[in-house]
Image (tube, rainbow, N blue to C red):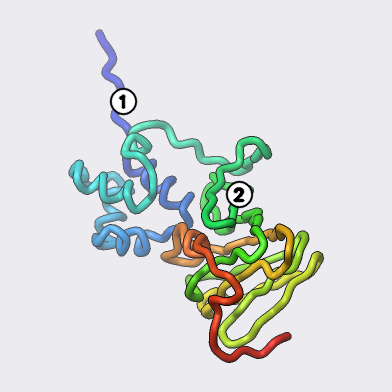
């Protein structure tokens, strides 16, 4: 008697992908224009989603649809080798992802290298969660709400990221910064907002220096 191959557990794999992105069922539902109840039914295997629904889910999760039909490894420990870091680069800013793939990951640490005069956020950005910055070398200026904070090597800064903020390399040599984003409900890949150029001359408006 020929044994039939087992069907993929789409619901379980959807849950694992969602948790890796640090999303609640409600947050994923909002991103897909679905109800949180519908997400719950799919994850529990109580309904079979259409192909179009699967595509919508994977688009919000930034994952290929095949990820729902192949084994998802639920990693509790992730080692990232220097040579295997993923990175994004734009307008004099390079952001290297230092760690990704942990089950239910809530933090996203990045090594940021900025050329002289380069900055993130032509307009100040806001997002959910918290942001931590540690200046490794050079001089970096953070503008948070109506205040300016100048960081030199060894200085650190942490703040609630719902406040309008941006950064800029104010040194005449490349600067390096360790940035850790802490995801909050509904947040996903919002670090990309920081990948647009801003020079010191672009900033305007009153600010208090510290």
Q: Residue at coordinates 55% horizontally, 79% vertically from top-left?
A: 203
> Residue 118's x, y, as percent?
60, 64
Q: Quadrant of the C terminus?
A: bottom right
Q: Residues within 10 Å of mark 1 (few under 14, many from 20)?
A: few
> Residue 75's x, y, as percent?
56, 40
Q: Residue at coordinates 62% horizontally, 41% vertically from top-left?
A: 78
Q: Is residue 35 left or right of residue 148?
A: left
- In this rendered view, identify the residue nearer to me: 143 or 57: 143
- In this rendered view, identify the residue nearer to me: 18 or 63: 63
Could you tell me which secondary element the residue under label 2 belongs to? strand
- In this rendered view, identify the residue nearer to me: 26 or 61: 61
Q: Quadrant of the N terminus?
A: top left
Tell me, for residue 6, which label it has, or none. Answer: 1
Q: Residues within 10 Å of mark 2 (few under 14, many from 20)?
A: some
Tell me which numbered mark, 1 or 2, is placed earlier along the sequence: 1
Location of residue 141 (image quadrant):
bottom right
Q: Residue at coordinates 26% horizontally, 45% vertically from top-left?
A: 55
| Residue position for label 2 | 96
Residue 94 vertical placement versus 129 (above, below): above
> Residue 176's x, y, as percent?
71, 58
Residue 27 vertical placement versus 62 (above, below): below
Q: Residue at coordinates 36% horizontally, 45% vertically from top-left?
A: 14
């Amino acid at each position: 008697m020929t044994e039939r191959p087992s069907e993929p557990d789409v619901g379980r794999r959807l849950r694992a992908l969602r948790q890796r992105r640090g999303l609640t069922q409600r947050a994923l539902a909002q991103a897909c224009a679905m109800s949180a109840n519908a997400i719950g039914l799919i994850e529990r295997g109580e309904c079979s989603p259409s192909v179009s629904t699967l595509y919508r889910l994977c688009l919000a999760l930034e994952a290929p649809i095949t990820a729902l039909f192949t084994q998802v490894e639920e990693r509790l420990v992730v080692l990232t080798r220097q040579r295997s870091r993923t990175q994004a680069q734009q307008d004099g800013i390079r952001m290297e992802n230092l760690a990704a793939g942990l089950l239910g990951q809530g933090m996203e640490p990045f090594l940021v290298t900025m050329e002289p005069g380069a900055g993130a956020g032509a307009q100040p950005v806001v997002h959910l969660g918290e942001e931590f910055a540690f200046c490794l070398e050079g001089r970096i200026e953070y503008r948070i709400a109506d205040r300016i904070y100048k960081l030199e090597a060894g200085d650190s800064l942490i703040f609630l990221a719902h406040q309008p903020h941006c950064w800029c390399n104010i040194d005449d040599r490349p600067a390096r910064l360790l940035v850790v984003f802490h995801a909050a409900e509904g947040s996903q890949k919002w670090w990309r907002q920081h990948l647009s150029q801003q020079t010191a001359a672009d900033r305007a408006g009153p600010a208090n220096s510290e």
